[in-house]
Amino acid sequence: MLLVDNPVMQRELLTNLRAPRAFALMLLYQIALASVVLIAYPRDVKIDLSRESASAQRLVDFFFVGQFAIASLMAPSFTAGAITGEKERKTYEMLLASPLRPWVIVSGKLIAALTHLVVLILGSLPIIMLCLPLGGVSIYELLAAYMGLVFAIFLFGSISLFCSSYFKRTSSSLVVSYVLILPILVIGVFAWLALSSRGDFRLMMTVTVVPAASLLVSILLLSVTARRLLYPPDIGSQGSEVIDLEREQREAVGLVIQRDQFPDKLFAPPRRNKLMEDSANPVYDKEMHAELFSQGTLMLRLVIQLSMLLAIPLMAFLLFLFPNLASYYVGYVLVFSLLTAPVFNAGSITSERERQTLDLLLTTTVSSSQILWGKLISGFRVSFVLTAFLMFPMLLACINPELSRNWRAMLAYFGICIAASVFNSVLSLFVSTVVRRTSTALMTCYVTLLILYGLPIAIYFLFWNFAPPDTNVENLRLFGITSPLMAADSVPMTSVQSGTTTARAKIGSWLLVAAYFGFTVIATSLLLALTTLLFRSRWRLTGRG
């Protein structure tokens, strides 16, 4: 019954694959991949097929690294809400009370969620086949790469489903899934590129080690998930009960959040034991003392521990051993901010609507500005403090003489991280005002931020590797004013070696950094103005919840 006559899988497949967005996503995905191949395809008048093509090898590597990154980012979006969605829709107990066995539920949810993603990935096979006539890549390497990609998708989906069974909200499950998958993504990309010159060894690893490790970890995670559904600890209230924070701290394993001590009280202030002051913002007070932590601190503790666990080796390697690569550590901080900011802000308005409390909020004497600023500052406070934990190693690295001499660059790095954090939170609040569901708001935020941050880098890398020699590719860096990752990479660094000072050449340099700050300030101001206008016109004045 796991695969045949599985009602959970049949229902989820019909819902997902028949939706109009499934066809739209397939169309956009195929157009994007076809554009990549069209841009990177050799334009020589005559192509020598008697020797291997280095451009074809680079194209295939770029193609599969891109698909691997897309799979790692999309798999949680399909799977992280599989069980939390049932809790949020108040159908969790009905599902557990059905005669379906836990393994049937788990397998049905996983297969239905990942089928659409697997179809997207396999749909690109005819496009990449166009690179085979160029030589340098065999059909066996392509099939092995797709095999490893499918097993990686299965692993990513299992991780997300496992997280979905442990949390009450999709947003919490989503961010923990991303934090767990991010190290796998980094290791996979570096391993694939590092073994590009050893095709036989990479082929063997892809068809043996990757499937075996993925299956082993996936089966273990799915077994724990099925057992959790068999003996659910959150039954009785659709998994949405309020957590006793004092009891959770006593029973917590690992990191314990002390709300009355520094730095924990920066993002988790202690409970208020006296009346709220008349001048205080009641929305901000409610968010900080009740709303953000009503489901416990498990997600926060996991995010802090996992992110710091990855930050320690990155700090040692990128900030101390090779300080000229400090921009890559800044990129890690920016990616973390991209993942966490929507979690705390994208549901600011949509969660009130879903709980049917928006009308009650609008009928109070609290002004629109107090509501919006309370929501924004509370969510930004938590997300920025979590990001600041990763920025602290950058401050610690200033004791390195190589980086202390580049104090202007370090200030620019801090400024870029702060500006990106503010923009991420404001964008998330704006999206939460526009859409009606928290899950839709989260995915809209992630897609928008990935386009703004990642698309300029992908375009630059694509033209840098495959454009004709006479093309001035460096001018394309100026299109990266929307990307803090591109801005961080463009910050000029001065390295001192053997008594001589040499500057790391960057086209654009401070010009691109200044352009990024200008774009971010203007975009943030416009989003704040639009958010206030839309909130007043769509919710406050109409009174619709």
Image (cartoon, helix red, strand yellow):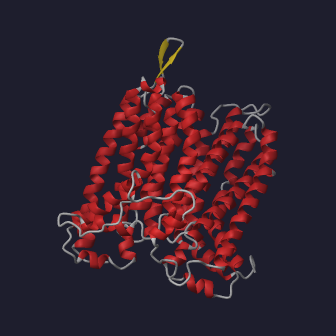
374 in relation to 453, above or below: below
Drawn side of residue 102 relative to residue 334, left or right: right
Drawn side of residue 172 relative to residue 352, left or right: right
428 in relation to 103, above or below: above
Q: Quadrant of the C terminus?
A: bottom left
All told, the count of numbered labels is 0
Drawn side of residue 5 relative to residue 438, left or right: right
Where residue 418 sits, quadrant-wise, is top left
Residue at the (69%, 78%) spot, across then down: 102
Between 199 and 106, which is closer to the camera in this rendering? 106
Drawn side of residue 37 relative to residue 489, left or right: right
Look at the image and tell me whether residue 531 can be seen: yes
Look at the image and tell me whether residue 27 can be seen: no
156 in relation to 517, above or below: below
466 in relation to 210, above or below: above
Where residue 344 appears, x then y in whole percent? 41, 61
Between 249 and 87, which is closer to the camera in this rendering? 249
- Give the residue at the far top of this rendering: 499
Where residue 527 appears, x then y in whole percent? 30, 55
Where residue 1 appears, x then y in whole percent? 75, 81
Between 68 and 162, which is closer to the camera in this rendering? 162
Between 381 and 52, which is closer to the camera in this rendering? 381
Where residue 153 appears, x then y in whole percent? 67, 59
Residue at the (38%, 61%) spot, across then down: 345
Where residue 543 sits, quadrant-wise, is bottom left
